[in-house]
């Protein structure tokens, strides 16, 4: 959080419309998951500076099929301007890539399960695929060159409800990540994943008895895949339900996701 505050004065110059170097490709980042990707961060608790969208950042409005400022798309409005990690993530990426447009495409829904909804062919996954394809098609129609540059994943809480889903999580996640890379044509697409929090094992309104199994599965996927980075979230504060990250936590998560993504991008080999 402190690092993000130090970035704010540098980011203010980017608010407003796009003013970018000609010929620079648009860096498209895919965001996906369940309620902690949806986010329970509260817009009114943001510093004024963070309510201003950097000038080189836009987010795709999945319903209205157009590019919007952060917090202004139809999904954000429908959720009373609650936000996830995208706010801090966008500000961090905007500073790192001042000559590029940063395009975010976020698909998330609380309570959704990898096992039954996020696998290839299932409802949430197909919606996720359709959303980013529509976004990329819109950019290309406008004559812009695009790179699907990375993916953020914050999900797994609901798969800890039963041992069957928890035990299947590792194989399911590997399969889903593999399909994303195949469909995007990015064999080494960097993926930054938030590991579900151990706070789920405290008293919650829901049953997350097998959270530890899902955590181990997430760690195993990251250990086996050099292009997957995992962020442990036990240090993040939650609401009273011990499940959903609060405003401070969503900003911290987004900042850490930006740091990990930039580290992954720095290791990539230049395109011939």
Image: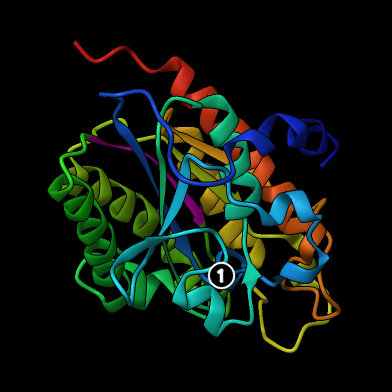
In the image, residue 241 sits, relative to residue 230, either above or below, namely below
- Identify the residue shown where x is 71% and y is 51%: 50
Q: Which residues are magenta?
A: 146-153
Quadrant in which the C terminus is drawn:
top left
Relative horizontal placement of residue 200, taking residue 13 as reference (left or right) = right
Measured from the top left, where is residue 158 in percent x and y? 55, 76
Q: Secondary structure at mark 1?
A: helix
Please state which of residues 147 and 58 is positioned toward the viewer in this rendering: 58
Q: Nearer the viewer, residue 5 or 204?
A: 5
- Magenta span: helix, strand or loop, mainly? strand
Packing grade of label 1 (10 A; few <14, some 14-19, many >=20) is many
- Name the residue furthest bottom: 205
Spot occupied by residue 194 in the image (x, y as percentages of width and height): 60, 51
Q: Can you say which quadrant of the picture contains the N terminus?
A: top right
Can you give x and y, in whole percent of width and height, for residue 262 in the image? Answer: 53, 27
Q: Work out whether 247 lies above or below 181.
A: below
Q: Is residue 187 left or right of residue 162?
A: left
Tell me where residue 14 appears, x and y as whole percent: 58, 37
Q: Which residue is mark 1?
A: 38
Residue 59 in magenta stretch: no
């Amino acid at each position: 959080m402190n690092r993000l505050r130090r970035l704010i004065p540098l980011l203010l110059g980017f608010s407003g419309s796009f003013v970018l170097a000609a010929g620079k490709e648009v860096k498209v980042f895919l965001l996906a998951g369940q309620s902690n990707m949806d986010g329970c961060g509260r817009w009114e608790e943001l510093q004024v500076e963070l309510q201003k969208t950097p000038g080189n950042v836009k987010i795709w409005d999945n319903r209205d099929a157009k590019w919007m400022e952060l917090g202004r798309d139809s999904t954000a409005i429908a959720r009373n301007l609650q936000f996830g990690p995208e706010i801090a993530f966008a500000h961090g990426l905007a500073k790192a890539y001042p000559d590029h447009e940063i395009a975010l495409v976020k698909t998330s829904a609380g309570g959704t399960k990898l096992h039954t909804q996020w696998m290839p062919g299932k409802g949430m996954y197909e919606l996720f695929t359709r959303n980013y394809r529509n976004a990329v098609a819109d950019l290309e129609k406008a004559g812009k060159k695009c790179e699907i540059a990375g993916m953020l994943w914050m999900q797994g809480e609901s798969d800890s409800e039963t041992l069957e889903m928890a035990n299947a999580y590792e194989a399911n996640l590997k399969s889903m990540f593999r399909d994303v890379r195949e469909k995007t044509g990015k064999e080494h697409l960097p993926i930054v994943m938030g590991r579900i929090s151990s706070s789920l094992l405290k008293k919650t309104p829901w049953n997350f008895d097998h959270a530890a199994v899902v955590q181990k599965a997430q760690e195993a996927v990251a250990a086996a895949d050099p292009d997957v980075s995992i962020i442990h979230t036990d240090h993040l504060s939650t609401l009273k339900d011990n499940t959903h990250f609060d405003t401070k936590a969503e900003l911290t998560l987004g900042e850490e996701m930006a740091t990990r993504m930039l580290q992954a991008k720095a290791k990539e080999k230049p395109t011939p």
